[in-house]
Image: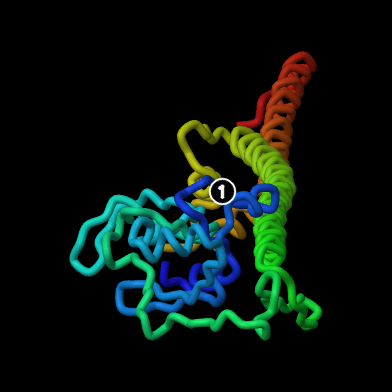
Amino acid sequence: MFNADSLASFKGKPITIGHPGAVNSKNAKKHMVGTMLEPARQDGENVVVPIMVYDENAVTSATSGKTKQLSLGYRLDLDETPGEWNGQRYDAVQRNIRINHLALVSKARAGDVATLNLDGDEEIALDDDDNQPKGKTMQKIRLDSDLEYEAAPEVVVAYLALKQDAADKQTKLDEANTTISTITAERDTLKADAAEFETKLKQAREDAAVTIKARAELEAKAEKHGIKCDGLDDISVKKSVVAKLKPSIKLDGKDDTYINVAFDMAIESAPMEQQRKIVNQDKAETRNDASELKGSAAARQKYLDRLHGKKEAK
């Protein structure tokens, strides 16, 4: 209630006898007997506001004590989050209180503290003479253009009610626009997140394809040299290949970069090693063949010599 906006909403609101429900531009003339002249101000735990009651029956009822107590009619947003304030527990908080009207009642919920101040010193006595103005007492009203006019009290009240209706509708419109902006921002964020997800998913698929291809090529190279890859990660496979092709290279304590280079060199040099082995094997076989041919020729020569009566050399 002591929020600045709540206190400001007192100004110009109608005064009624009892609570007629929400007062608006359509029923203001029927129910209004006065108006609150200024924004309210806090006075300790209470609220004080200057008012004007111009309806004769309302004044009579108030001065007689029949409807001297006051009760506010207002709208609010109820926050049902429990908590504690000044050592007292509460179950809910009334927020965004906006005054609609002030009712003159016989017994207010707040008791005697919510009452009209009708001290005799504040009463004004008027002499009944010909100089008294006839007709209704006029009130001043300031428009949004800052121009000031005099008008009958009910006109002022109706104008202020219309103005408040417009302000309330503008508030709701602003809240709706804020909600729309929030929803739009959330939608745009979700769209951006979706686009980013698609990009990351595409990249992940491409990376997976590269990884699968590289693994397949690695296994093919390893199996070519008799290395089984089951249960081995890439580095372990490469270490096994190097150990077989280049047993002189020790990989203990070496980092992945060293192992990768050693693997590449071992694979690249493997064809040359294989070719060298084949050449050496061919040479050995040639030597053996030559040896065998020489032995056959010698045996044949011995046969021919015996055939011609030649003696075998000893």
**SS under mark 1:** loop
Please state the horizontal and vertical placement of residue 111, each as a whole percent of the image.
27, 60
The answer to whether residue 221 is left or right of residue 234 is right
Q: Is residue 133 left or right of residue 33?
A: right
Above or below residue 32? Residue 271 is: above
Q: Residue at x 30, y 73 (%)?
A: 45
In the image, residue 3 sits, relative to residue 261, either above or below, namely below
Q: Looking at the figure, which quarter contains the C terminus? A: top right
Which residue is more in the foreground, 295 or 63? Answer: 63
Q: Which residue is mark 1?
A: 22
Q: Considering depth in this image, is 92 or 132 the residue closer to the camera?
A: 132
Q: Amino acid at mark 1?
A: Ala
Q: Is residue 100 above or below residue 40?
A: above
Measuring from the top left, give residue 282's x and y in whole percent.
Answer: 72, 37
Please tell me in which quadrant of the rendered image residue 94 appears: bottom left
> Can the viewer see residue 178?
no
Q: Residue furthest front?
A: 129
Residue 69 in sight here = yes
Q: Measured from the top left, where is residue 55 in percent x and y?
A: 55, 62
Q: Report the side of 280 relative to 236 (left or right).
A: right
- Residue at 78% x, 18% y is 304
Residue at position x 42%, y 58% in the image: 61
